[in-house]
Amino acid sequence: MTDVAARAGVSHQTVSRVLNGVPGVREETRTRVSTAIESLGYRRNSAARTLATNRSGRIGVISGNPILYGPSMIMEAVQEAAHEAGYEVSTIGLNVFTAESMHEAVDRLLDQ
């Protein structure tokens, strides 16, 4: 983000405002930042964003036998809806549901 800010001649806060679609940034500035982002190939660091906001933007799903048609169609719909809302989905498929396997699945999701 610092490199984008330097290339566009703005502060890193302005780059953040542009990336987050905050109103109040002049169109000329928004264009300069967008051009710098594109020319540098800048991509957001989701780990840094998670640390800064304390939000992962991720939905965890534990599914039974995800290779079957019904559960796989449900997961496809969940992933599509999550993507449209700006979220990512982490999926864990279980073939056997026990208290231990559920606890392990939840722990794996929380580790993400």
Image: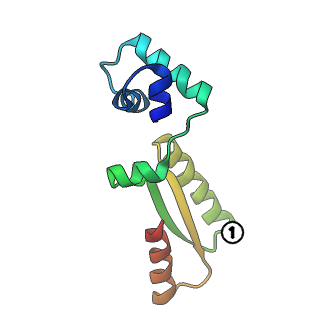
Way the structure is coloured: rainbow
Image position, residue 62 (x, y; %): 51, 70
Image location of residue 40, percent across then percent down: 59, 30
| Horizontal arrangement in the rendering, residue 50 relative to residue 4 (left or right) | left
- Where 42 sits versus 60, above or below? above
Residue at 33% in and 50% down: 53
Question: Horizontal and vertical percent for residue 48?
Answer: 43, 50
Of residue 14 and residue 11, the one placed in the foreground of this image is: 11
Q: What residue lies at 43% left-to-right and 31% top-to-bottom?
A: 19
Tell me if residue 10 comes above or below residue 27 in the rendering: below
All told, the count of numbered labels is: 1
Determine whether the residue tagged by mark 1 lies in a helix, strand or loop. loop
Residue named by callout 1: 68
The residue drawn where x is 34% and y is 31% is: 13
Relative to 67, 35 lies left or right? left
Q: Residue furthest left?
A: 24
- Classed neighbour count for the residue bearing mark 1: other residues with Cα under 10 Å, few (<14), some (14–19), many (≥20): few
Residue drawn at (48%, 16%) of the image: 31
Q: Is residue 57 above or below residue 5?
A: below
For badge 1, the amino acid type reads Leu
Residue 69, by quadrant, is bottom right
Q: Nearer the viewer, residue 78 or 24?
A: 24
> Looking at this view, is 47 or 67 the one in front?
47
